[in-house]
Image: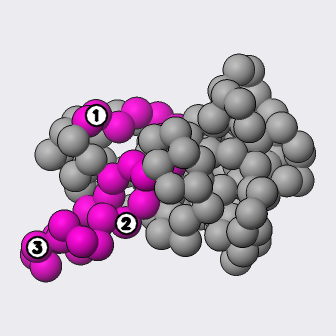
C-alpha cells in the first residue's frame, strides 16, 4: 500500500468570525460554546496557548463545520517573522491569528514537532505526536 500513517481528525464548528483555511492553527472556543456543540474552534493571537485544538484541513466557512487534524503530520501556516524554522523544533501558537511559530517562552505549550520546513510561511508539523 502507498502512504504513511493515518491522521486523526475530528469535526469542529468555526466560531472565529472569519473563514478558516488549510493550515490554520485553531484553539478550543470554550467561552462561546452553548453546550450543544462542544467542538467550537476559533483562531488565537495569544502566543504559546495551551488551548490548541488542531490544524484545519481544507476550508471552513464562518458558522460552518469542517475537519481539523488532532494528531498526525500536516501542513501548518507559520508566522513570517518567527516561523517554524528548525526541523525537530517545537511548534506553538503565535500572535498572528491562525499561524504557528517556534516555541520561545513556554515550551510545554507546544502542539507538535516540525518535520519539514516548507515554502514561505509553512511547515509540516506532527501535531500532538509528542504528547
Q: Nearer the viewer, residue 88 or 72?
A: 88
Q: Residue at x 19, y 67 (%)?
A: 32
Cα gap from disc 1 to disc 3, whole angstroms: 20 Å
Q: Is residue 28 left or right of residue 125?
A: left
CB atoms of marks 3 and 2 within 8 Å: no
Q: Tell me, yes or no, if residue 50 can be seen here.
A: yes
Residue lying furthest top: 120
Disc 2 element: strand
Question: Would you call the spot at circle 2 few (<14 residues within 10 Å), some (14-19), or many (20 or more)?
Answer: many
- Labelled pair 2, 1 in contact (Cβ < 8 Å): no
Q: Position of residue 77 (x, y in %)?
A: 59, 35
For residue 62, which quarter of the picture? top left
Residue placed furthest toward the right: 87
Color encoding of the figure: one colour
In the rendered view, tell whether residue 13 sits above or below residue 33: above
Classify mark 1: residues with Cα within 10 Å, few (<14), some (14-19) or many (20+).
some
In the picture, measured across the screen, residue 49 lies left or right of residue 86, that is left
User: Residue 34 got which mark?
Assistant: 3
Q: Quadrant of residue 86?
A: top right
Kindly identify which residue carries mark 2. Answer: 28
Q: Which residue is mark 1?
A: 19
Badge 1 or badge 3: first in the primary sequence: 1
Residue 3: x, y in percent?
71, 44
Amino acid at each position: 500500500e502507498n502512504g504513511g500513517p493515518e491522521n486523526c481528525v475530528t469535526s469542529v464548528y468555526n466560531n472565529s468570525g472569519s473563514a478558516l483555511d488549510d493550515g490554520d492553527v485553531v484553539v478550543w472556543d470554550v467561552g462561546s460554546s452553548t453546550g450543544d456543540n462542544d467542538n467550537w474552534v476559533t483562531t488565537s493571537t495569544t502566543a504559546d496557548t495551551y488551548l490548541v485544538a488542531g490544524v484545519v484541513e481544507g476550508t471552513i466557512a464562518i458558522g460552518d463545520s469542517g475537519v481539523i487534524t488532532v494528531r498526525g503530520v500536516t501542513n501548518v501556516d507559520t508566522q513570517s517573522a518567527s516561523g517554524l524554522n528548525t526541523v525537530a523544533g517545537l511548534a506553538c501558537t503565535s500572535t498572528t491569528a491562525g499561524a504557528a511559530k517556534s516555541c520561545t517562552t513556554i515550551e510545554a505549550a507546544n502542539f507538535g514537532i516540525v518535520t519539514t520546513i516548507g515554502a514561505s510561511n509553512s511547515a509540516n508539523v506532527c501535531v500532538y505526536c509528542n504528547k
